[in-house]
Image: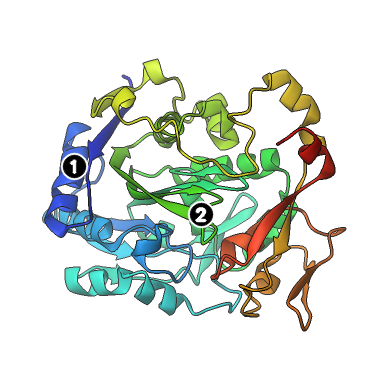
Amino acid sequence: MKPRVSIIKCDNYETDLVESSIRRSIDLIGGIQSFIKPSSRVLVKPNLLMAKGPEFGITTHPEVVRAVIRILKEINCQVFLGDGPSVWGNQIEDVDAVYRISGIFKVCEEEGATLVKFDKRRMRKYFPLTTWLDDCDSIVNLSKFKTHEFTLLTGAIKNLFGLVSGTYKTELHKNFSDINDFSRMLVDILEEVRPSLTIVDGILALEGNGPATSGKVRKLGLVIAGQDCVAIDTIMAKIIGIQPQDVVSTKEAALRKLGVCEINSIDILGERLENVMEQSFILPSTSLARRKIPRFVINIIKKLIKYYPVPIYERCIKCFACIKICPNKCITMSKKGIVYDYKKCIACFCCQETCPEAAIKLRKSIFAKFLGL
């Protein structure tokens, strides 16, 4: 059978509208009991990257979380909800603040879900994942529709990176600094976790230099649901006007037969794909996906095309977030603001991702400027 992916229009985050949209998105692909066993223990994993309110488009909206909790409780599930934000284990900011400011704490309190922290881990292959995966029968993956300067797209597969426990995320960025290696690592996590159901919050999306404060909020007005993470990321890629294979994790997961990345092999329900495609969607400045350059040429020159993070001193509040998150410890603080040791920088953009004030931008290498990239 073809994997089913539903696309539902949802114009805003009004409680009843979100709930009805998510119910329809799940019903179209078979209903909640096709994916979740009644009276089971379910881990709900949203994208809670940092302590920002839902209006910034960075985190999964609390009304999406509310709707999913209600649907699960109707079949008598015990619902646990948590994420490992980029702050976790680095003391950049309190994880409780992420839960509170994102609006998730309030929703869990109102809807009777148990909010948990990923403070205990068990090694799976070469990475530690939260032990809540052992304690629960299934996982519902609530990703956010966002661009990403390093991986191009934050979708169903990338959202699972938040299951990595503690400061080990930083180690994985350091050990897998090449995008191909990093993407293979993400697919290893997918292969280990296999979410029972994925729902994408695309009502407000993030475009440009996402996935955090450097991105731009865009009203997309969509909810996407399915079980096949590869198929979902394929649909997301097509919506923003790129090829699914441009997202390395999608390409790698499809090669391993963990899902489907051919549009004709996906059963798309609800809205027609051609009616929701956003050709003007702004991609990260690091992306070559829409450049009119033959792919074989890109494969040859991409190692010569470099992008580096640089500070915007007038925005820097000297919070030390970038220094604490940096995998290679290449950032220090001066009187003026942060200073990079570019000989050590691996261009993972963790600093920009964790900056609460969008105080870090990208600089192109001379070769990239010469090519007009």
Displayed quadrant of residue 370: top right
Please name the amino acid that badge 1 sits on.
Gln
Give the CA separation, mark 2 to mark 1: 36 Å
- Residue 276 place in picture, x, y as percent: 32, 31
Residue 33 - label? 1
**Residue 256 in sight in this render:** no
Q: In the image, is residue 297 above or below residue 345?
A: above
Instruction: Give the position of the N terminus as an image quadrant.
Output: top left
Residue drawn at (73%, 26%) of the image: 298
Precedes in sequence: disc 2 or disc 1 = 1
Q: In the image, is residue 179 above or below residue 6?
A: below
Which of 265 and 119 lies nearest the eye of the viewer?
Answer: 265
Residue drawn at (77%, 54%) of the image: 346
SS at circle 2: strand
Label 2: how many residues lie within 10 Å, few (<14), some (14-19) or many (20+)?
many
Please give left or right for residue 3 compared with residue 354 in the image.
left
Please give left or right for residue 137 compared with residue 315 in the image.
left
- Residue 59 place in picture, x, y as percent: 40, 60
Most distant residue in the right direction? 343
- Residue 282 place in picture, x, y as percent: 50, 41
Residue 96 - label? none
Label 1: how many residues lie within 10 Å, few (<14), some (14-19) or many (20+)?
few
Which of 199 and 12 lies nearest the eye of the viewer?
Answer: 12
**Residue 117 in sight in this render:** yes
Q: In the image, is residue 298 above or below residue 107?
A: above
The residue wearing badge 2 is: 215
Displayed quadrant of residue 132: bottom left
Residue drawn at (28%, 63%) of the image: 62
How many numbered discs?
A: 2
